[in-house]
Image (spheres, rainbow, N blue to C red):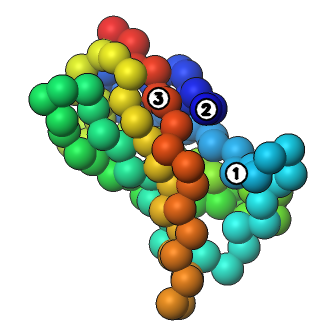
């Protein structure tokens, strides 16, 4: 299972990039209108979601999404959160496998 590192409690505004891959291959994510990172905290469970955008250089063909937390929407506790990307376009929905997000103090 993949891990996302570099996320800290209360930190916001810092751009974070996620690479979309299946096995070792980059996934072309062009054409998906809504790109969301859904997150679940350790118990007691808090659910949150963050909108993602394509990076300016790849426009989705390079499989890179970027997001940042806001002051109103940031992890509120340290620990191993779970994350999942949801990509939606028209009637199509693609979900990643769940992965670990290590949230530090």
Dot 3, crowdedness within 10 Å: few (<14), some or many (≥20)? many
Given residues 66 and 22, the one toward you in this image is: 22
Q: Earlier in the sequence, mark 1 or mark 2?
A: 2
Q: Quadrant of the N terminus?
A: top right
The residue that label 1 is drawn on is 20
Tell me the quarter of the picture where residue 78 sits.
top left
State the residue lying farthest toward the right: 25
Residue at 24% x, 20% y is 77
Helix, strand or loop status at disc 2: loop
Q: Earlier in the sequence, mark 3 or mark 1?
A: 1
Give the farthest residue toward the left: 44
Give the residue at x 80% y 47%.
23
Q: Is the residue 93 above or below the residue 80 in the image? A: below
Quadrant containing the C terminus in the rendered view: top left
Residues packed near mark 1 inside 10 Å, few (<14), some (14 to 19) or many (20 plus): some
Camera sees residue 43 = yes
Q: Which residue is mark 3?
A: 101
């Amino acid at each position: 299972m993949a891990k996302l590192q570099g996320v800290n409690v209360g930190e916001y505004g810092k751009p974070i990039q996620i690479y979309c891959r299946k096995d070792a291959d980059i996934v072309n994510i062009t054409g998906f209108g809504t790109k969301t990172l859904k997150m679940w905290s350790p118990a007691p469970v808090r659910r949150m979601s963050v909108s993602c955008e394509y990076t300016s250089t790849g426009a989705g063909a390079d499989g890179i999404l970027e997001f940042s937390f806001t002051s109103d929407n940031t992890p509120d506790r340290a620990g191993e959160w779970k994350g999942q990307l949801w990509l939606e376009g028209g009637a199509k929905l693609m979900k990643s496998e769940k992965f670990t997000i290590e949230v530090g103090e």
